[in-house]
Image (cartoon, helix red, strand yellow):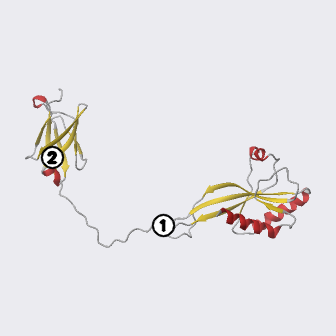
């Protein structure tokens, strides 16, 4: 994982610099007394997996950003080493070289003045096998029940029609509203053709209705509803 990228970078840096330079993954520091190259992992971000992934894989990909700086008592020599690293990195097709303008508070957090630097951005990919869907051993079966349109009236005390009542079928959650005559028309499945079950919302109250199916129109009386 990340340690593999670290190892790869360390081996690459060792091929470019003088052996007297130590390679560290610690952030650059003002307290160093020996020559060293800092390869500091300072940022990670999500990235889109490349086109090489297969349909059987669900890869996770992030981009690792490393900050490269060089410390030496001889400033000219540190510039030379940094330049050698920079042009060696730019010749690598799998390295993305960047020159970010890091904000002052970044260097302040490290306790040092801004240093000459560049960044290397490398992808880290973790491939996961996609869960396989179970094998379909038989053709799908589709059952289509009969649908009928049922009409009815919602009536209050003294058979006054209730306008704007909401009728919701218990089985299918189909909804219809009554007109000024209290009349509704609703699509119902075969279960509702034997017993009409619904909930009715009217004038701030809710009623559960269950009545044997009768020849339409169905008459629903809400006698305990206020006018």
Residue nearest the observer in this picture, 43 or 95? 43
Verify CB contact (< 8 Å) between mark 2 and mark 1. Answer: no
Give the tally of numbered discs.
2
Going by the image, does 210 lie left or right of 122?
A: left
For residue 211, the mark is none
Q: Is residue 206 above or below residue 85?
A: above
Residue extending furthest left? 215
Q: Residue at the location (72% across, 66% down)?
A: 7
Going by the image, does 188 lie left or right of 87?
A: left
Quadrant placement of the C terminus = top left
Residue 49: where, in percent of width, then height?
57, 63
User: What residue is shown with label 2?
Assistant: 196
Residue extending furthest bottom? 137
Q: Is residue 132 above or below residue 32?
A: below
Q: Residue at the location (80% across, 62% down)?
A: 23
Going by the image, does 185 lie left or right of 13?
A: left
Residue 173: where, in percent of width, then height?
25, 47
Residue 79: where, in percent of width, then height?
86, 59
Which of the 4 quarters of the picture holds residue 200?
Answer: top left
Among numbered discs 2 and 1, the one appearing first in the sequence: 1
Going by the image, does 63 lie left or right of 180?
A: right
- Residue at mark 2 to residue at mark 1: CA–CA distance: 47 Å
Residue nearest the observer in this picture, 130 or 97? 130
- Secondary structure, mark 1, is loop
Residue extending furthest top? 227
Residue 111: where, in percent of width, then height?
80, 45
- Secondary structure, mark 2, is strand
Q: Residue at the location (66% across, 62% down)?
A: 2
User: What residue is shown with label 1?
Assistant: 130
């Amino acid at each position: 994982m990340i340690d593999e990228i670290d190892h790869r970078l360390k081996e690459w840096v060792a091929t470019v610099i003088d052996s007297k330079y130590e390679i560290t993954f610690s952030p650059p520091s003002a307290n160093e007394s020996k020559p060293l190259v800092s390869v500091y992992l300072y940022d990670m971000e999500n990235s889109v997996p490349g086109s090489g992934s297969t349909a059987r894989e669900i890869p996770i990909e992030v981009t690792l950003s490393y900050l490269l700086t060089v410390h030496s008592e001889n400033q000219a020599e540190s510039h030379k080493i940094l330049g050698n690293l920079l042009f060696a990195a730019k010749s690598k097709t799998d390295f993305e070289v960047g020159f970010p303008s890091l904000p002052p508070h970044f260097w302040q957090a490290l306790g040092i003045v801004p240093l000459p630097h560049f960044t290397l951005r490398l992808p880290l990919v973790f491939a996961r096998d996609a869960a396989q869907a179970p094998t379909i051993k038989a053709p799908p079966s589709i059952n289509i029940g009969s649908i009928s349109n049922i009409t009815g009236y919602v009536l209050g005390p003294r058979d006054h029609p209730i306008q704007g009542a909401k009728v919701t079928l218990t089985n299918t959650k189909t909804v219809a509203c009554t007109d000024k005559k209290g009349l509704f028309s609703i699509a119902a499945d075969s279960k509702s053709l034997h017993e009409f079950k619904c909930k009715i919302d009217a004038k701030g109250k809710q009623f559960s209705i269950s009545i044997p199916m009768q020849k339409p129109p169905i008459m629903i009386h809400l006698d305990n509803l206020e006018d």
